[in-house]
Amino acid sequence: MVGSVNKAILLGNLGRDPEIRSMQSGAKMASFSIATSKRWKDRNTQEQKEKTSWHNIVVFGDGLVDIVEKYVKKGSKIYVEGELQTRKWQDKDGNDRYTTEVILQGYNSNLTLLDSRNNSQVSSDNSEQMDQSKSIDDNSFESQKADSEDLDEDIPF
């Protein structure tokens, strides 16, 4: 294998409101936890079982942190893609501790709000931007169409 992949994909619900902090550089970061659940039926007892796992998520980048701050709340259903990272830290007694987190930073990450109330808020706030981008796309399509017609005339067969 030539390379490697470090990607975590989670779909779950927030267990608490996100915590927004400012770093020494002035940039903001958000942290929260997501619960994912696994359900199955016990073969012996036919009883429904459930196991919940908690995942720590850390978001960097002012734009994405602003979205988290405005729209993501306790109980929100979200989809995240990020990179797994384990960091070492020391507790009050000086013991080494390790925490594994899903890091959302840069272009290799994704956060999608899945609650209908969140989607309607996001779309209503961005409707003007969407209309502007649509008109830009429409204009660029027209110019591409004109360019492609010119190319057809130059083909020798």
Image (cartoon, helix red, strand yellow):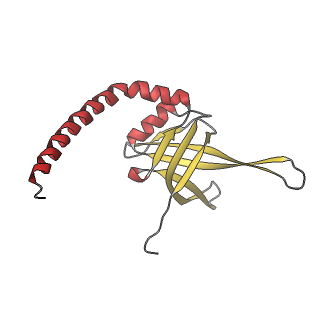
Residue lying at the far right of the rendered structure: 45
Residue 146: % across, % down: 15, 41
Query: Is 134 or 30 nearer to us in this picture?
Result: 134
Query: Is 84 or 2 nearer to us in this picture?
Result: 2
**Number of labelled discs?**
0
For residue 127, above or below residue 97: above
Q: Quadrant of the C terminus?
A: bottom left
Residue lying at the far front of the rendered structure: 157
| Residue drawn at point x = 49 percent, y = 38 percent | 20
Q: Is residue 16 left or right of residue 84?
A: right
| Residue drawn at point x = 53 percent, y = 34 percent | 72
Residue 43: % across, % down: 85, 55
Residue 76: % across, % down: 58, 35
Residue 124: % across, % down: 42, 24
Q: Is residue 7 left or right of residue 94?
A: left
Query: Is 109 or 94 nearer to us in this picture?
Result: 109
Residue lying at the far bottom of the rendered structure: 1
| Residue drawn at point x = 9 percent, y = 53 percent | 154
Q: Is residue 139 left or right of residue 77?
A: left
Query: Is 66 or 49 nearer to us in this picture?
Result: 49
For residue 56, above or below residue 96: above
| Residue drawn at point x = 52 percent, y = 47 percent | 80
